[in-house]
Amino acid sequence: MTSAIPKGLQELLQGVLQYAQEHGPWRIYQQENRKWMYELHDLKRWGCTGVIAADYHSAQEARQIADLGVPVIVLLQPHPMRRRGYPLFRWPCVVWNSDAIGQMAANYFLERHYTLFAFVGHIFSETYWSKERDKSFRRTLRQAGHRKCHVYAPCSEAEQHDWAVERPRMEAWLQALPKPIALFAPNDRRGKQVLDACIDAGVSVPDEVAVLCVDNDEWICEASVPTLSSIQCDPRPAGYRIAAHLDRLMRGERLNKIEYSVEPLRVVSRQSTEWVAIADKQMACALRFIRVNAANPRLRVADIAKSVGLSRRATEIRFRNATGRTVREEIEHVRLERLRSLLLENDGNISELAHKCGFACQTHLGRIFRARYGMTAGQFRTAPHESP
């Protein structure tokens, strides 16, 4: 089963509708190819004063929209719009912050101590957001000292139009990769194809290949076996802001073109990345134990040592050698990352959220949070989500 409207576009439209409800009323019409519906060439009859365009219109329709003589905004900017000759180039649009997305993917894998990495791009290799995510992913890895990233070769024209044609090549490529390896795909649909190819090629996910993708479309991620980890983005604020831009244009203001950015929120971890790439298997078990139990404010180093059958001293030495952190530092790191995610997506009381993450002392939390992020938890919550 597939969704008629992509998740990202649905969430952008939710932001548009929120603005319309707060500042309207707006009468929003959907253009369809039926004679009795509202047609683009007959604007005066039904009173159209602005156009909200998506990314799936043809070049001919883009030209028709550009010639209407009314303000336009473009949701989910299509690749051709990056070129000045595109009919809707001059209008404001929404773009993904692919630089931040690629960086988040790389850091996610680095936190899990991977040393081998791969990227599988979009089937259309010139897709700008896929290229930008690839570039940022590899740049972040290089900055961390990892210069090698295995990149899947672009699809041929035949492969672009038929997954059955491409699949054998992807399966052979996945089998040949060194392992364990962390693989990043630019969206959920491509990640699902990688996952299916792994299964048919006999490549185990996640212990041989860990797969991470983008969009967090639950129809794809939760329906996959194993379930897919994905970067969750937040398109609604961009939808709200670009709707406000359209409103000002429809009121007669002269505004410069602006690109409104969709920001990544967090990685939603599922089965496709539930593995830790370190050679010391007991310490890998210790890491998993910490992630499962970090919300317990009574969690101690002795508990981790007991879980892996070692003395406290032996656990501390081997853990630091394997991960570069002390056991206590890892516990705090996991708690801080969970609190950070909650702050970005939850309006609850900060003290209550901190307690859910395992922090019993607010003074201690305030000190380490500021040391880690350079601001208080309250400042962190408001910084990424300024009022639209």
Image (spheres, grey):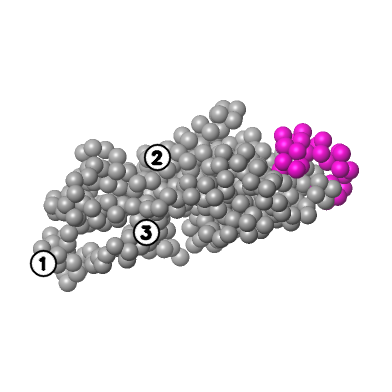
Residue range of the region highlighted in magenta in the rendering: 304-330
Mark 3 or mark 1, which is nearer the start of the sequence? 3
Residue drawn at the location 10% of the way across and 63% of the way down: 44
Name the kind of residue labelled 3 in the image.
Answer: Gly
Labelled disc at residue 45: 1
Image spot of residue 356 (x, y percent): 66, 58
Q: In which quarter of the image is residue 279?
A: top right
Q: Few, some or many C-alpha atoms within 10 Å of disc 2 (few <14, some 14-19, many ≥20)?
A: some
32 to 271, vertically: above or below = below
Residue 96: within the magenta? no
In percent of the image, x 42 and y 38: which residue is there? 131
Residue 71 x/y as whole percent: 19, 52
Residue 232 visible within the image: yes
Disc 3, SS: helix
- Residue 277: x, y in percent? 69, 41
* Residue at numbered disc 3: 15
Position of residue 218 in the picture relative to residue 369 (left or right): left
**Residue located beneath label 2 in the image:** 125
Q: In the rendered structure, which disc, 2 or 3, sits on the residue that comes first in sequence? A: 3
